[in-house]
Amino acid sequence: MPTRKLFQPPCTSRSASAHGSFDRHVRLDRRDEAQLVTALREVEPDILVDLACFQPGEVDAVVRTFTGTRYLFMSTGVYPNLFGKTATEGDFVPLAGEVSDGDLEYMQAKRWCETVLFRHQQFPWTVIRPPAIFGARDYTLRIAAYIERMLDGARCSCRARRTNGEPAVRGSVTSGARPR
């Protein structure tokens, strides 16, 4: 069955050209706030899907400059270490204290990114916690289905069953403010 092309979002990356088939590519270093501001002004996205951000200062920059209806932050479902216990939303609690200015290791950085978003409840954010870490060489496009369902307003369930029949959270979605 052929799929209908509803829209073709631009791709942004540090590369000189996009990987994949995109109608438009904007080159920027996601870590450079000035380049982020320029790209957001140029593209004016309604929805910003951020697969590259993993430092809390980068989330702060988005909160300050993004004016669209929803920011989708790709986090990770591999924290905290639950030692085999089924994860619940309550296991993903915001951290206390001041946000570090320096570069943090991956999982700690993702936790702080979520904390920054949680502290900005008026900002329209959604955190997606896939059960794996996605990268440039992931040709399965498994995250596309989750994003499409969310854009359609459908419930996003990312659950699996353990061999003993108990449910096991394989990923989760948390949202902040409603769309503007």
Image (tube, helix red, strand yellow):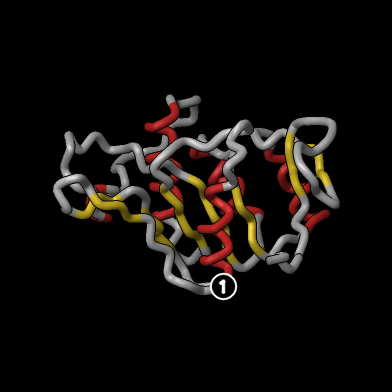
In this view of the protein, which residue sits in the foreground, 177 or 79?
A: 79
Question: In this image, 58 relative to 164: left or right?
Answer: right
In this view of the protein, which residue sits in the foreground, 79 or 162?
A: 162
Q: Residue at x 38, y 62 (%)?
A: 157
Quadrant housing residue 70: bottom right
Question: In this image, 166 relative to 146: left or right?
Answer: left
Q: Is residue 131 above or below residue 135?
A: below
Residue density around tag 1, few if under 14, some if 14–19, many if 20 or more, within 10 Å: few
Question: In this image, 87 relative to 16: left or right?
Answer: left
Quadrant housing residue 155: bottom left
Residue 131, position in %: x, y?
39, 43
Dot 1 falls on a residue whose secondary structure is loop
The residue type indicated by label 1 comes to Asp
Residue 49, position in %: x, y?
61, 53
Q: Is residue 113 above or below residue 63?
A: above
Q: Residue at x 39, y 47 (%)?
A: 115
The total number of labels drawn is 1
Q: Residue at x 22, y 47 (%)?
A: 162
Residue 127, position in %: x, y?
45, 54
In this view of the protein, which residue sits in the foreground, 81 or 60?
A: 81
Q: Residue at x 34, y 37 (%)?
A: 78
Q: Is residue 64 above or below residue 180?
A: above
Mark 1, residue position: 152
Residue 110, position in %: x, y?
43, 38
The image quadrant where one finds the N terminus is bottom right
In this view of the protein, which residue sits in the foreground, 32 or 87?
A: 87
Q: Is residue 69 above or below residue 119?
A: below
The image quadrant where one finds the C terminus is bottom right
